[in-house]
Structures are given as structure tokens and as C-alpha cells.
Amino acid sequence: MLVNKYSLKEIYQGRLETGDDLLEELNEFVEGKEIEAGKISAIGAVQKATISYYDQETKEYNKKSFEQSLEIVNLTGHISLKDGVPILHAHIILADEEGNTYGGHLEEGTKVFASEIEVQELDNADKLRKYDECTGLTLW
Ligand code: ZN
């Protein structure tokens, strides 16, 4: 296990607006605040969603879309630098009216109904993503 220790710089809390694209809006916030490292969490509900699943054999993301309203049970995302640019990597768990859950890598095309978010910005972090040959992913 590879672990580093950081301290917290700022905590932001807020809400997104109905119709926002969840991933785009979070990325715009991260870019606007020039956050280079941190963590995002959110709860709420979406009008529709697109998530993906990373196929470990083909090393490709397979997308799946839901054209229905769903609860955001949880969203967890990490902000770090990839090639000098802040990247948000977020996963989401969604629930339907029966309580069935679906989860995966958050993709653009997920439209917010309502969402409360929290962004934790880390201080003096040097979290850089590097390509990992074994998994085909860019990891810390
Ligand atoms: Zn992912």
C-alpha cells in the first residue's frame, strides 16, 4: 500500500441546480477554484444518468445510461493532477424507487435534479496521476 499524509486547506459546501450536468459542473468548480488535490462527495437525485464500468480484460470503459430519475445514494470523487491538469475521478451509487442500486464511474450526461456537495481541498498536495501498465489506468 502506498500512502501519503496531507492536511486540509478548505472545505466547500453547496448545491447544484436542476438540469446541471453533474460531472461538468463539478469539473468547472474544481477548475474555477484551481483545486489541484482533494475529495468530493455528494448526495441528492438525478433526472437521468450515465455511468461506466471498466472492463479489466479489454481495458475499456463501457457506458450505461439510465433515462429515469434516481437517488444519488453517494458520490465520491478524487481530484488530482494528470499531466499538470486537475482531473476529477468520481464514482456514484444510484438507487431507483424500489431501492435497487446501480453504480460505476461517473460520466457526462448525468443531469441533476437536486444535489448537495462537499469539496475538501488538500494543502501542499502533490498527487500526480501516472499511467499504470498493469491496470491500463492513470493512478496515484
Ligand atoms: Zn473510475
Image (spheres, helix red, strand yellow):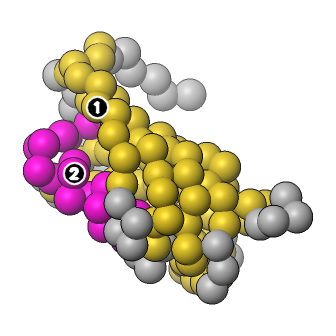
| Residue density around tag 1, few if under 14, some if 14–19, many if 20 or more, within 10 Å | few
Quarter of the view holding residue 10: top left
79 in relation to 18, above or below: above
* Front residue of this view, candidates 90 and 82: 90
Number of dots carrying numbers: 2
**85 to the left or right of 23:** left
Question: Could you say where residue 74 lies in the image, as x and y percent from the top left?
Answer: 61, 47
Mark 2: few, some, or many residues within 10 Å (few <14, many ≥20)? few
Residue at point 33% right, 40% down? 14
In the image, what residue occupies the spot 41% across and 55% down?
89
Q: Nearer the viewer, residue 57 or 113?
A: 113
Q: Nearer the viewer, residue 12 or 9?
A: 12
Query: Does the Cβ of the disc 1 residue fall within 8 Å of ligand 1?
Result: no
Quick one: SS at disc 1? strand
Q: Residue at x 49, y 65 (%)?
A: 113
Q: Tags 1 and 2 in contact by the CB under 8 Å rule?
A: yes
* Residue 71 in which image quadrant: bottom right
- Residue under the point 88% across and 64% down: 98
In this rendering, is residue 11 above or below 68?
above
Q: Is residue 11 magenta?
A: no
Task: Please report the bounds of the magenta region as a residue range.
Answer: 21-39
The answer for how far apart the CA atoms under marks 1 and 2 are is: 10 Å
Kind of residue sitting beneath label 1: Tyr
Secondary structure, mark 2, is helix
Left or right: 34 as drawn, with respect to 140:
left
Residue 127 drawn at (x, y percent): 28, 36
- Residue bearing mark 2: 29
Residue 56 screen position, x and y as percent: 65, 70
The image shows residue 41 at horizontal and vertical percentages of 47, 41
State the mark number for residue 12.
1
Name the quarter where the N terminus is drawn: top right
